Amino acid sequence: MGNSYAGQLKTTRFEEVLHNSIEASLRSNSLVPRPVFSQLYLEAEQQLSALEGGSRADNEDEEEEGEGALEPTCPPNPYQMHPPPEGCCTTDGFCQAGKDLRLVSISSEPIDVPAGFLLVGAKSPSLPDHLLVCAVDRRFLPDDNGHNALLGFSGNCVGCGKKGFCYFTEFSNHINLKLTTQPKKQKHLKYYLVRNAQGALTKGPLICWKGSEFRSRQTAASTGSSSVFPPAESSGPLATFSGEPIPGTTPCIPMGAQQAGPASEHPSLTAAVSPAVLNGKDSPKHQQLVKNDPSAMPRPSALGILSNSGPPKKRHKGWSPESPSTTDGGYSQGGGNRAKHESAGMSCMPQVGLVGPAPVTFPVVASGEPVSVPDNLLKICKAKPVIFKGKYSSHGNFPYLCGNLNDVVVSPLLYTCYQNSQSISRAYEQYGASTIQPISEEMQLLLTVYYLVQLAADQVPLMEDLEQIFLRSWRESHLTEIRQYQQPQPCPPAPSAVAPVTSAQLPWLAGLAASSCNDSVHIIECTYSLAEGLSEMFRLLVEGKLAKTNYVVIVRACRSPAIDSCVAVTGKYQARILSESLLTPAEYQKEVNYELVTGKVDSLGAFFSTLCPEGDIDILLDKFHQENQGHIPSSLTASSVTKSASLDVSGAPACTSYNLEPHHIRPFQLAVAQKLLSHVCSIADSSTQNLDLGSFEKVDFLICIPPSEVTYQQTLFHVWHSGVLLELGLEKEHMTKQRVEQYVLKLDAEAQTKFKSFLQNSFQNPHTLFVLIHDHAHWDLVSSAVHNLYSQSDPAVGLVDRLLNCREVKEAPNIVTLHVTSFPYALQTQHTLISPYNEIHWPASYSHGVDLYPENKKYFGLSEFIESTLSGHSLPLLRYDSSFEAMVTALGKRFPRLHSAVIRTFVLVQHYAAAMMAVSGLSQMKDYTSVETLEITQNLINSPKQCPCGHGLMVLLRVPCSPLAAVAYERLAHVRARLALEEHFEIILGNPSSGITIGKHFVKQLKTWQKIEDAEWRPQTYLELEGLPCILIFSGMDPHGESLPRSLRYCDLRLINSSCLVRTALEQELGLAAYFVSNEVPLEKGARNEPLESDAEKLSSTDNEDEELVTEGSISEKRSPVKRERSRSHDSASSSLSSKASSKSQGSAPCGESSAQPTVPSQGERARSPQSCGPSEEARAPGDRQRPHASRGPPPVISRRSPGPTPQPDSGLRTGQRSAQASVTVSSSQLSSSGSSSSPMTPAAGTLVLQASQCSMSKACRQPPIVFLPKLVYDMVTATDSSGLPKAASLLPSHSVMWASSFRPLLSKTMTSTEQSLYYRQWTVPRPSHMDYGNRAEGHVDSFHPRRLLLSGPPQIGKTGAYLQFLSILSRMLIRLTEVDVYDEEEINITLREESDWHYLQLSDPWPDLELFKKLPFDYIIHDPKYEDASLICSHLQSIKSEDRGMSRKPEELYVRRQTARMRLSKYAAYNTYHHCEQCHQYMGFHPRYQLYESTLHAFAFSYSMLGEEIQLHFIIPKSKEHHFVFSQPGGQLESMRLPLVTDKSHEYIKSPTFTPTTGRHEHGLFNLYHAMDGASHLHVLVVKEYEMAIYKKYWPNHIMLVLPSIFNSAGVGAAHFLIKELSYHNLELERNRQEELGIKPQDIWPFIVISDDSCVMWNVVDVDCGGERSRELSWSERNVSLKYIMQHIEASPNITHYALIGMRKWSSKTGSSEVREPFSRCHVHDFLILNVDLTQNVQYNQNRFMCDDVDFNLRVHSAGLLLCRFNRFSVMKKQIAVGGHRSFHITSKVSDNAAAVVPAQYICAPDSKHTFLAAPAQLLLEKFFQHHSHRFFPLSLKNHSHPVLSVDCYLNLGSQISVCYVSSRPHSLNISCSDFMFSGLLLYLCDSFVGASFLKKFHFLKGATLCVICQDRNSLRQTVVRLELEDEWQFRLRDEFQTANAKEDRPLFFLTGRHI
């Protein structure tokens, strides 16, 4: 299917289709419900999908192999192929010799073609997207007319070179066509192949197999009559199916082919015309799009790019029909060129005949009759008529045109549209006979007429609209058709309800439809051919009879069953726009250049210069200049120049509205940066190994931008100020501009060298992650293949493809490509490289009414601009200028040969010039400009006067065509000079290729405002022009991402190329105005209290208007209280909204000015006093108008926003400055926009100018600019389609793509960006010139590039800031990946350490001295900080004050996070599963020698008396680790694990096997010890629970696993330790027996194992300088070492086998010299133990324990008289891991589903009570209960450390407030002396037979001390009480019996408590 994600399109979009389908299945008795969605999601057919093989009528051709083909219409007869020979290749696309035949693979290889042979493309049903290249003898191929092919076949294989295939069957077997039907050359040889300009083979014209199309069925078709020539009027099948294009007919008959005598050549030829072929059974099946017409493209010379299909690109105006003479050079006017354009865009749309040769009953018109185009056509019509070819079938070709071809334009667009709509039913076809007919041709034409009739005079027809009309009409008829097929029938019945339109009725119906339109649509009916109609049309045009007619529809529909038609657009406006829209952007520029260079525009210039009362503008200007020489015009006395000079001298900042804001990152940008980061992480986390984040240490980047100097400087500025280079560590503090330039690449001619060094850098630094950012990524998507065509002319063409898509970038594992764009549509096609999962869309600011990222700025983009045009908003921000449009239209008629862009530019420049003159005092010029332009100019010139510093506003004048921009600049600069306005505002020519040039005077002003000292400073970005009054003439075909300053007030887009109606182009232009407005003003309240607003305005503003935006009339005045002649609503001259418009118009022209300024009343209604020309005046409601103008001082000012923090600027945009001032007093002569406390005042009428003046900047942050659009674009943007989206959104998304099918749903308003992306991915395909065009051909199933992301967001919203922030957080994350949180806690209970006489004083001993060590006393006290809350162990009568213990912790602090420190991982760290590096691939099992998961399961059993049964363990042993084990020879049974000898001295391996018990940490456990062991060989066994075996095996395929028996699934760590130790001892015995046979003594076998936690991450050693043995001073340092170093050091200890347990310190940053002073201690060891299983044979871990089992074991080992040694100078760091481990035990209620936590007090209950039972092991409940509530059992012991609880044979944690004294009941055990102790309690836990009554009698208890006996069941509880004679000294009560809260089947533990008598 097209795109593996297409199916995810969330669909509320297909309601209609779904509805139809459901309805059909409900009504049907037996019809299988239609699989609508699978059909909709099928890869949309390539636009002309079935370019191959016309529609076929013969039975054998029923099967269809069109590109979008669905199932065959009826099951074909299975065709048995011979099985291929043994051992030959059967891969699709390869021949049996294994050579590749696919066109995409061998297009550029030289192919030897024998003389007389041609290369043709064969289609294989199994490879619909590919052509296979074959060499075929041309004699066996048809000529251009589809005739004269010899029967038979002769061909060669171009792959293996095998020659002489004489049968097509044999050949098809050889090239692996794998057919299910009889192989036929007609069906499978589809295209000629031709070489393009680069010599690469490409798909050429179709092979015109006429014979096959015409061999009609021998059987009469099911519904048709069998007569060969039925009466044409036949009302039977013909009437029924006349709507069908006839499938069986030839697409390729040129006129005159009939004379070839069809009857003789194909006896059954004539039957083709019979209605039989019309039967519905097969016709829809064959609704292939029209096939290419080889007659237009003679094969040998077929022109270039033919593979393209779909909506055409803009096409050249002139035309040469696609007729045989075209490419033969029959016309001199570049016909070939034209044909090439058409074919490139149209996929060579054929001039197809939809019916075969005309039936003999009709007279035949001579085929070649040309139509002459009259010579003076353009002069008469005032525009070039555009002729859209429609249906032309009966004679196979559109009529030839001859004569004055320059004056007409011919386009196949309509034809394509018809054809595409014919194909829509294919998406709906079912198995078997199709019930769905496509829309009939007659209906199509009729709908076209209806559509044209309802178009308004100023509307232009759009193909997209027409397609949607056809689609809707078809859907409606489709629904009624389905209803008729309730009974299955072999063939469809005639629809009874609605008789379709017949061709005979068509002209009459069309005429009827057109009769209502006042002759704007004229129908011409012709009898024989379209040529008549065209001649008639030209005659009427020349005679002037079509003056009112916009469209002429020519129909030839007399009695024949098929129709010919074409539509000519003759309306001057429409014809001009349509003909210009057919030009490509390059042709458009060429045309304009040509007109400028050849002087064609001079007549226009001359016309304009006369437009003034004096008759010559220049004379008037000169006169004015002379009169005013030497002084500035009086109207401008308050000039900004004088003002700024005077006020700045004082040194005080005179304007408070201008402030530069610091660089901030906004919440939105942060959110987007985090989304980007999470996408990068998900690429890394996926199992595809496409990105190994763990292997990168730092981030580097390169930002690629379009070749615009301003964008380049702007990006440098952002990079510089974001601090990202410092953060990434790429640059030092003091970086230079040159250094920053290394990171930004302008994609121009010099780009390649810089890019090469980037690639080289990435290659040399594999541990740096390079992010290649492609900003403005929708620019230049041209494929590098196309570049080869143009390379001479423009080296930049295809540059993006050559650089960013080069093999090195695609394959480099350390380059991530990020495309950033506001218009991602062209990167979202069926062939895109970017996975939909790698798209990041800018988030919406609101979700379900919640403001997700509160910001103090609101983004104002396209949708908000459109919203402002809706009713309810006071003033629209989008407007058009009707008087401008009217003038352009009038001049268009006057100068028909000039391109409208030229006319529009000249008109607009004239308007600006006249407006400047009017404002300067030449009031007579006001009638020669439009109201809009006058308002803009007034505000521009007067705004600096409103500000003490002279800040003004910017007017953006967009002139896409650079030569025209230069003309505009020169003219405006000339007028400005003559009016002496050079000091008042600047005119800047903004050209992408050059920087900004502005006058010295203005540079000085900017430096003053921005407080810049640098003498050399010049503005380099538009953002730096903040506050400068200027006109920016912005040229270049596309904006390149330049940001504009806040002072932009007017965005004049009246000159944008309105014909380029594609979504990207439109949104890109409108994106220039995107803006951030301050959010601090409540939107609804905006303008009510706007300073400077007259009362009049207030009356008309209503609450619900979006006033924040519009507060003052044209928002323009927002910034400039200067007059505007009348308010513009949408169309300023005549809009119904005009009364509203006034509502906010900025009324107050400061009154004091009025005397100085001659007013400029505009046409018509200007009887106002000078000060009344406040712009809003004229359009006011009548009531407003009578208000005395005197009231116009500043109205009361009420603070519009509370003082708040400075608004954060968006880092990515208009960075500079946004104003937010502290309150400013009114007396300082300005009303600050943020003057939060200005007091209300009601000034008198004559307030001074300065008091009312307000800097235009003050409103900048509250109001977006006003945008002026061409009327056409305005209508397009503000109109909505049926889905509620702006019409513009449903346009073709980009020039470089085309629709995959007309059968596509509309975009919907509710679609999210993600859904829109999926929509475009499903419904658009790239054109051949697009860089993604070849992507699918690469043969990958998944053609997405894994390391490519796409960030899209509205223009100017801050994407640059977001991706720079992303780089920062990515860098932080990589650093974070190399860091780890390790526990960093001081040892506890240091003060309680016994001061014994014995210390280990030989401070420099590397190993402990056995004799000295034995004398050390054992330190019972626990020092490990994780046991801070554990009971203290008393070893002698300590006088511990209760406060000495960590009692101070409040209960809630028990769960506080333990202290950690962040450490950088060293090279000796242990890693989790996320680490992959080259070195440890083999260790981890990702190695070619070892297949992943290749391991074996071995059972291993041993008996253990304590458990009373045999223990069955399982080992999973990977093949690579089998050498560590011994297996029995014959059976391969696991016998033992090999152990080394004590005497072995090798440094290559670690002797002790390491066991790591683990649960819940398959991903996070640190089991990769490769680096920790420094690569040394070691044996590492993971000990896992049975239920976790599979997941651990998946993550650690190369690790040995020891799987615990299932009975231990819910056990704690004690069970794992117990089994590890028992297994190891059992293994030691087995190894001793095995090696004894080899002569080795049993005591020589290595008895140690390591038991390590799964969170040990690094190991350290302390180097001590003792400075003399007795010295008190100790200097020491700690360093990180490998575990190998530590293990080998310990394993080398002398007498090591005498130690039972060896451990090390836990690392802490707070370790003092006292702790490392003594190298060894005899104390508790934890976390990382080296255990002697031989010595500890009789000391077991308690397998029931969950907590403190290591303390319990340490005490047992010591009491057994064995040595525990802690190496104090080694330490282990433990990583904090938040998952798994003991946390995986959750105690919940066994019954209820509620997940409420159960509190520890509920862990025990009375026996037989109705207490809720808990789902947890009894032992865990017991331990947890004692930890929290032991004081309930031992009340006397609480905080009573001198009277501890006596605990026999076990250590249980009774909580930190109770101390315990441990004694062992074993004979000969070491115990402390208890004679001095009076115990406050006795704890007997599961005591065994060693505990007897006499043993207990030795101990003394306080009166009232408590006893707690714990047993497995109630019976043994009673027995124990009796056996130990407890009742002698202890008193028991019935109610003192308890049990853990377990159900019986979970074997609860029982307690009995008593009191000492």
Image (cartoon, rainbow, N blue to C red):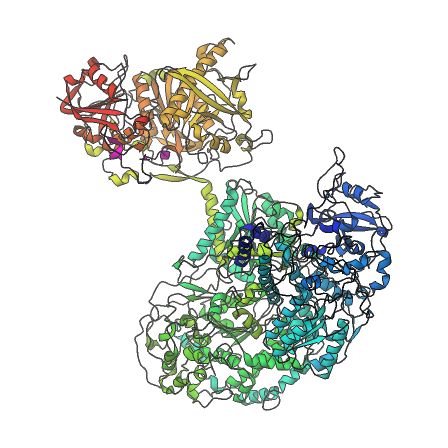
Residue 406 shows in the view: yes
Q: Does the magenta stretch include residue 1286?
A: no
Q: Is residue 1002 above or below residue 1724?
A: below
Nearest to the observer: residue 1814 or residue 34: 34
Q: Position of residue 455 (x, y in %)?
A: 59, 74
Q: Is residue 1548 left or right of residue 57?
A: left
Q: Is residue 1154 left or right of residue 53?
A: left
Q: Position of residue 114 (x, y in %)?
A: 85, 48
Q: In this view, does 753 lie above or below 1923?
A: below
Q: Is residue 1800 magenta?
A: yes
Nearest to the observer: residue 924 or residue 1071: 1071
- Residue visible at 71% across and 40% down in the picture: 91
Quadrant of the rendered image containing residue 592 = bottom right
Quadrant of the rendered image containing residue 1247 = bottom left
Q: In this view, does 385 lie to the left or right of 1288?
A: right
Magenta stretch bounds: 1782-1807
Quadrant of the rendered image containing residue 1295 = bottom right
Nearest to the observer: residue 207 or residue 1711: 207
Q: Where is residue 133 in the image (x, y as percent from the top left)?
A: 76, 48
Residue 629 shows in the view: no
Quadrant holding the C terminus:
top left
